[in-house]
Amino acid sequence: MPTDPGVALDAVVAAFAAVGINATPSPASDPQADLVLDVHGTPLAVNIKVVATATPQSVATWLRTPPVASSGNGPACLVIADRVVAGARQLLTDNGWGWLDLRGHLRLSGPGIHIDTNVPATSQAMRSPRVFAGKVTLEVAASLLLAPDRPASIRGLARELERSPSSISAAVSALQNAQLVDDRYLPIVPDLFWETADAWRPATTTVSRIDLLHDPAISEVLHTAWDDVAGSSGWALTDTLAAAAYGAPAGVRADYPPDFYVPDEAIARRAATMLGVPTSEAARGATLHVAPVRQVCATRRPAHDAETRWPLAHPLFVALDLASDLGRGREILDGWTPPADVTRVW
């Protein structure tokens, strides 16, 4: 599904209004600019470029295609995107382009104007959420992101995910139509990561007595599979504690309650019964997330040291959890280089 210029235009007009500047879309008969700003009584023409995700790679391509950066002699250039990732922000700024990240930030510099501020986030993303309407599409996205440099095939994905080739073909077609997968079935990164992050909403529950997880009988009933990390599907540490274990810049107390992925809702309900439900936040022993796709609990990694103790979720799934936190989680992601055998896709 291509980006929607109508949504983008409404969003940018609202963003400028939030900082006290009147922005008027140019008439279709005017080829010189897309938008005209009233800057203290002086008009400023602005050309806009609408994309789902602005990445350093895509920005570098635009900068090689005339016209390049904004100048005092022509319209200012403004990128509008659901997401402008950190590296793209810097590249745009260095080359005189402005940007509106629809999560809530506007930057534009030009004659008589300098804006670099938070603005209200738009409630309507430019890409249709129907791309991830089914679980199969989420499974395909996860599989492609786990091996982003390996060309895939419909039948190969069908075997791996134990799905019919027809359902895999439909999911891949949806991702290709959304410009998230190329014609070799390779993921477009980081675009596919961030779109997957938007659809990544695991059900959660909290429990109180995680010390009981060391009891072999309870561990067996709850299918933790602590002792068979490589050969089975089981519980996996995720979120901030896992990111810190992988070396991400995530400062966290040693006694911070862990977050675990569990294989399915039945296990989460059983865990709540056996481990107890906390009566307050202070009594929370752990948060359990039901894995949105089977790969989460099947691609666990051993703990790096005795201090971590728990098997770790694959860095991809830890990153998807962090991406849901618009504040600290995004900061951790920006500064995190995953292990050498994992390709960074965010």
Image (cartoon, rainbow, N blue to C red):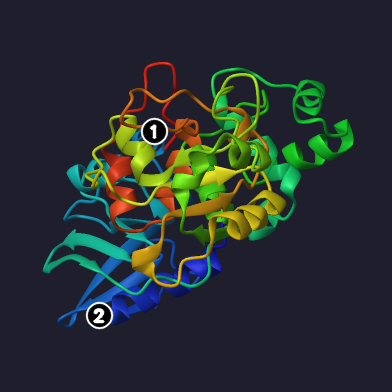
Which residue has dot 2 on it?
Answer: 21
Q: Is residue 181 visible?
A: no
Question: Around disc 2, counting alpha carbons within 10 Å, would you say few (fewer than 14), some (14 to 19), or many (20 or more)?
Answer: some
Badge 2 amino acid? Ile
SS label for mark 2: loop
Residue shown at 28%/64% (left/top)? Answer: 106
Quarter containing the C terminus: top left
Q: CA distance from mark 2 to mark 1?
A: 31 Å
Q: Residue at the far left: name it.
A: 112
Question: Around disc 1, counting alpha carbons within 10 Å, would you say few (fewer than 14), some (14 to 19), or many (20 or more)?
Answer: few
Residue 78 at what x, y percent from top left?
Answer: 33, 57
Badge 1 amino acid? Gln
Residue 268 at what x, y percent from top left?
Answer: 63, 53
Residue 262 at what x, y percent from top left?
Answer: 60, 44
Which residue has dot 1 on it?
Answer: 57
Residue shown at 23%/38% (left/top)? Answer: 249
Q: Is residue 17 visible?
A: yes
Residue 320 at what x, y percent from top left?
Answer: 48, 44
SS label for mark 1: helix
Is residue 101 shown above or below 215?
A: below
Q: Are marks 2 and 1 in contact (CB under 8 Å)?
A: no
Q: Earlier in the sequence, mark 2 or mark 1?
A: 2
Left or right, 238 with reference to 337: right
Mark 2, mark 1: which one is toward the viewer?
1
